[in-house]
Image: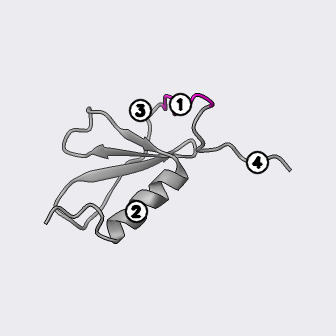
Amino acid sequence: MAESTIGSPLANGKKPQLDLANATWQSSSQGTGDVQIAFVEGYIAMRDGRSPEGPSLIFTPAEWRAFVLGARDGEFDLT
């Protein structure tokens, strides 16, 4: 059986250019920031909801999982 390539980086290590124009963005009701995420074509896009016209970060599912687990463990706490 062939392995899925959904959400995988391209052969050159880059991620594809995703069309985020019709993405359904979700906001958290917790925290002080306004981070939004959207699930698009097997990837997770993240942006600043206060500046939605700005750039979005694109994560593979494995990268997103590592990010979320690191955040839960306090890896990114600035205090």
Disc 3/disc 4 C-alpha distance (Å) = 29 Å
Q: Earlier in the sequence, mark 3 or mark 4?
A: 4
Disc 1/disc 2 C-alpha distance (Å) = 22 Å
Look at the image and say whether residue 69 sits in the magenta stretch.
no
At a point 48% along the width and 52% down the height, the residue shown is 63
Depth check: 6 or 66 in front? 66
Q: Is residue 56 above or below residue 29?
A: above
Disc 2/disc 4 C-alpha distance (Å) = 24 Å
Q: Earlier in the sequence, mark 1 or mark 2?
A: 1
Q: Which residue is mark 2?
A: 68
Q: Identify residue type, mark 1.
A: Pro
| Residue extent of the magenta highlight | 11-18
Q: Identify residue type, mark 2.
A: Val
Disc 1/disc 3 C-alpha distance (Å) = 15 Å
Residue 76, percent from left and from top: 26, 60
> What kind of secondary structure does the magenta stretch mostly adopt?
loop
Tag on residue 16?
1
Q: Earlier in the sequence, mark 2 or mark 4?
A: 4
Tag on residue 21?
3
In the image: residue 15, left or right of residue 46: right
For the residues labelled 1 and 2, say whether their Cβ atoms are less than 8 Å apart. Answer: no
Instruction: State which mark lies toward you, 1 or 3.
Output: 1
What is the crowding at mark 3: few (fewer than 14 residues within 10 Å), some, or many (at least 20)? few
Tag on residue 3?
4
At a point 28% along the width and 69% down the height, the residue shown is 74
